[in-house]
Amino acid sequence: MPDLITHTKQDENRQGETYAPFVNDPVAYGKKFYIESYGCAMNFSDSEIVASILNESGFGATRNYEEADLILINTCSIREKAEQTVRKRLSDLRTVKEEKPGALIGVLGCMAERLKSKLLEEEKLVDLVVGPDAYRTLPGLIEEAAEGQKAVNVLLSREETYADIAPIRLNSNGINAFVSIMRGCNNMCSFCVVPFTRGRERSRDADSIVKECQDLFNQGYREVTLLGQNVDSYYWSSGINGEHIVTFAELLERVALVNPLLRVRFSTSHPKDINDDVLYTIAKYENICKYIHLPVQSGSTRILQLMNRTYTREWYMAKVDRIMKIIPDCSISADIIAGFCTETEEDHQDTLSIMEYSKYDYAYMFFYSERPGTLAARRYKDDIPEDLKKRRLEEIINMQRKLSHESNMKDLGKTVKVLIEGDSKKSANDWMGRTSQYKVVVFPKGGHALNKGDYAMVTVTECTGGTLIGHIVE
Ligand code: SAH
Ligand code: SF4
Ligand code: F3S
């Protein structure tokens, strides 16, 4: 059983242990680099910053690692399996190094940060180890590595946001783009490695964010996803005495005002930080998507306390009520961990019942994986046997299947506004797009003169698996 559940192929880009080769004109550059990204959207977004830094220093991208002078793996440490996937990938690259000894191999991202120079001892073929806040130093590190030294920079920063770097969009469909608005995390969820691999929280200059969104719109993009580990704690002050404060609600509003045709999404919210200001802003603007990812992790107050999530079951349920009151058509999704330390059958039942209460449209479900150095690893025993973790995870997955199906059934007969993202996977005669609630809709192109990036009003007639099927309203 996988420890990661995805609902659609597209969702893999959010939290999949997937990789993303891409094309970008390598002819104009003397040297070629290849990059693969694993983990969350932040990592995919960081790879686009890395691509920009490398372009500046004369490297063009290739989608074929065999012809690359520099192979980079942007890694994830969130669960043990994520690290195993990367290790396996590194061992696949051994043959490349044998055939092209001059090629350099670099590990970026969270595994680089977690393991630091230890990674060089463990993985002999790695030449470079670069943490998430050190990408500006890549050109110098590449030179050092090319001279035969092992190059490492894993310094975390309190300021770095790469605000001035224009990302090179990788693997893009030209419609949806990630825009990083903050980095790091100041929460200390006891299970989580992110505060150790990403450092302290810091927000990016609001003006540079709005400008990036405006530029994307001008280039034809129609949806931006504002990214951060905890976007609701976004906070930017400007002016001589820091008198202009921009909160997340205000930033959201400024981005929504870029153009009514630009859809705005954001990820991820911590339940404790998403406030009424944010909810009213979502309700106010049609182009801010009615979709909130609100990770619950567990439905048991006792487990939530051990996880250091700082809310109780009742508090979370009240937050769900508040969202539905202010934004009645909002869809909600969650992250859930099965089998955290000391979890009893009763705690597990609490998770199943909070799922039913919240009526999640989607969920990303995992079983607990102990991460070295975290609070939980130091304080609690990882005492739930693997088969029990898996059984509970399976029950959680089955519950979510039921909830997703019920949610889709409710859409039958409705007419929804769909942003067209491209051809459907199965047929070039059909479009695929998404609703504001993030649901995938497939419908025949018919005789309508529509293009990727256009909006269509579609009546939903059936649903198969996670996909709604419909037809354009005449
Ligand atoms: N900052 C985001 C989450 C980032 S990690 C947030 O707080 O919402 C994405 C998800 O991975 C988490 O929400 C959690 O459900 C899961 N996760 C994190 N650490 C884990 C671990 N040690 N074992 C299993 N799942 C984990
Ligand atoms: Fe990890 Fe918690 Fe921070 Fe999310 S909020 S990144 S789960 S520590
Ligand atoms: Fe993984 Fe790092 Fe993201 S651990 S989930 S890539 S912040």
Image (spheres, rainbow, N blue to C red):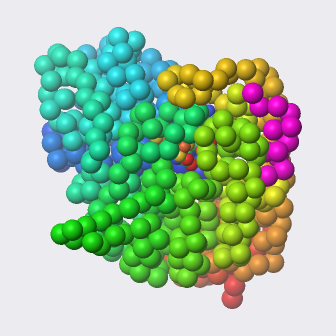
- At x 21% / y 35%, what residue is drawn? 138
Between 50 and 462, the residue placed more toward the observer is 50
Q: Is residue 42 above or below residue 106?
A: below
Question: Which stretch appears magenta?
Answer: 342-354
Q: Quadrant of residue 70?
A: top left
Horizontally, residue 339 falls left or right of residue 73, namely right
Residue sitting at 61 percent across and 56 percent down?
A: 271
Position of 391 with respect to 53 (left or right) is right
Residue 383 included in the magenta stretch of the image: no
Viewer-closest of 114 and 129: 114
**Quarter of the image that includes the C terminus:** bottom right
Residue 197 at x, y percent in the picture: 41, 34
**Magenta: predominant secondary structure element?**
helix
Using the image, determine if residue 190 lies above or below residue 230. Answer: above
Residue 427 as seen in the image, left or right of residue 55: right
Q: Residue at x 30, y 51 (%)?
A: 161
- Residue 462, percent from left and from top: 81, 68
How far from the left and from the top, in percent, is residue 314? 75, 55
Q: Would residue 282 be visible to someone looking at this image? A: no
